[in-house]
Amino acid sequence: MKTTFSIIKADVGGWPGHALVHPDLKEIAAIKLRDAQVSELIIDYHVTNCGDDLELIMTHKNGVDAKEIHNLAWDTFCEATERASELGLYGAGQDLLCDAFSGNIKGMGPGVAEMEFTERKAEPIVAFMMDKTEPGAFNLPIFKIFADPFNTAGLIIDPSIHDGFNFEVWDILEHKHVLLRTPEELYDLLALIGAKSRFVIKRVFPKKTSKLPESEPVAVISTEKLYQIAGEYVGKDDPAGVVRAQSGLPALGEVLEGFSLGHLVSGWMRGSHNGPLMPVSVKDAQCTRFDGPPRVIALGFQMKNGKLTQPVDLFADIAFDYTRQRALEITDYMRRHGPFEPHRLPMADMEYTTLPKVMTKLGKRFKEVK
Ligand code: 13P
Ligand code: 13P
Ligand code: MG
Ligand code: MG
C-alpha cells in the first residue's frame, strides 16, 4: 500500500506585515488536522510556519490531488483567515484567490507539494519550506542533490545511484513539461533550469535500473506561480518541497549539502529583488531585514506506515552557521545597490511595481535619439 506525503501551504495573514504566522493560526490548523487524524482522513500531520506562510504537512492514503485532502487544507486556511481578519493581521486571506472551492486546491493560490510512493523499510523524508522567494529557488539545490557529484558523493561511489536520476521540468509560461535524464542530458537540463523564473524542476524520479520504482517520485516541488494565477502581484509564491533520502537515494547529508551555498534567488522585498537564500532553524524563519533575506527551513522525519516521528529542525545545526554568515554578508552587499539591478529584478520580472506607470507618465517626454 502506498503512502502520500503532502505539504499544502498558504499565506493567510502576516504578523506583523509579512514577517511571521501568528500562533493562533497555527493552533487553528493543528486542531483541524488533529480532528482529521481522529476521523482517519489523514494518518499523521505537523503544522509549522516558514516566515508568514502557514505550512500543513500531512500523510494519508488518498494519493495526490485528493479532493478530501485539498478540501481539508482549504477549510483550514479559510478558518485561519477568519481569525487573521479578527486580529487584523496583514493581508488576511492573501493566498486564497477564489471564494468557491472546486475540489482541487491547485490554481487557487496555496502551494502544493505532494507525492505518493511505496514506503521503504526505513523512510527518511525531508520537508523543505521557503519564504520570500519563488519555485525556481529549488532548481539549484535539487540539481546539486540529484545530479552533481561535487555535492553528492553517492553519484560516484554508491552503485545504487550511480546511474543518476530523471528530472521532470516544467515550463511555467507555456504550461508544458519535459523529462530529462541525468547524467546523459545534464547540459540540456542546466540550459533550462538556469532560467529559473521560467523552467522549474517539478519532480525527480529514479532511473529504470534503480531498486526503487521508476514511476514513484523521490522529490517534488510546489510550482504554483501566484501572479500567473491572479494576473497581478499578490505576494510571492514561497515554495515547498519534499525530498526522500538514503538507501537508493542521496544520503540525508547530501540532501542538506545542496543548500550550503546560500545561492541567489528572486523574491525578498515586494517580490522584486535578488538575494541569498539563507538556511535557518524554524525559530529563525522570520523575514525582517528588508523583508528578508529569503529563508529556507528543513524538517526531517522518519516515516513508518504513514506515521511520522517528531521532526528534526535540520538547519538548526551550527554546521550551517558559515552559510548563514556568508548569506548575511551578501545581504548587506546586495542592499547597498538600492534600486539598481541586479539587486532589483530586471524589468521583465518586475511584478509589484510602478515601472509601467512611470513609463506611461513620461511617455510624451521621450524624444527620438537622432
Ligand atoms: P550509515 O552507514 O550509518 O547508514 O551511513 C551511510 C551514509 O549514508 C552516510 O552518509
Ligand atoms: P510574502 O509573499 O511572503 O507575503 O511577501 C510579500 C512581500 O511583498 C514582502 O515584501
Ligand atoms: Mg505575506
Ligand atoms: Mg511568504
Image (cartoon, rainbow, N blue to C red):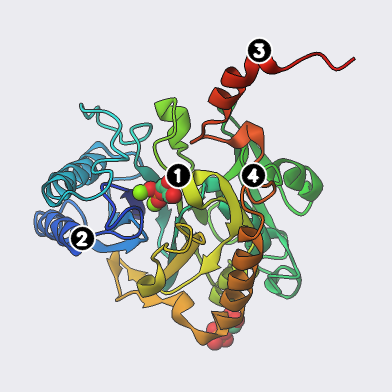
Q: Position of residue 240 (x, y in %)?
A: 44, 53
Q: CA distance from mark 1 to mark 3?
A: 33 Å
Q: Is residue 109 left or right of residue 40?
A: right
3 or 4: tag closer to the N-terminus: 4
Kindly check if marks 1 and 3 are in contact, taking CB atoms under 8 A apart as contact. Answer: no
Question: Mark 3, residues whose alpha carbon is within 10 Å: few (<14), some, or many (≥20)?
Answer: few
Pick the residue in front: 75 or 25: 25
Q: How many marks?
A: 4
Q: Secondary structure at mark 1?
A: loop
2 or 4: tag closer to the N-terminus: 2
Please give the residue where the numbered disc 2 appears in the rendered image.
26
Pick the residue in front: 77 or 305: 77
Question: Mark 1, residues whose alpha carbon is within 10 Å: few (<14), some, or many (≥20)?
Answer: many
Q: CA distance from mark 1 to mark 2?
A: 20 Å
Q: Amino acid at mark 3?
A: Lys
Q: Amino acid at mark 1?
A: Lys
Q: CA distance from mark 3 to mark 4?
A: 36 Å
Residue visible at 48% across and 83% down in the picture: 317
Please give the residue where the numbered disc 3 appears in the rendered image.
364
The reply to whether residue 101 is in sight is: yes
Question: Mark 2, residues whose alpha carbon is within 10 Å: few (<14), some, or many (≥20)?
Answer: some
Kindly check if marks 3 and 2 are in contact, taking CB atoms under 8 A apart as contact. Answer: no
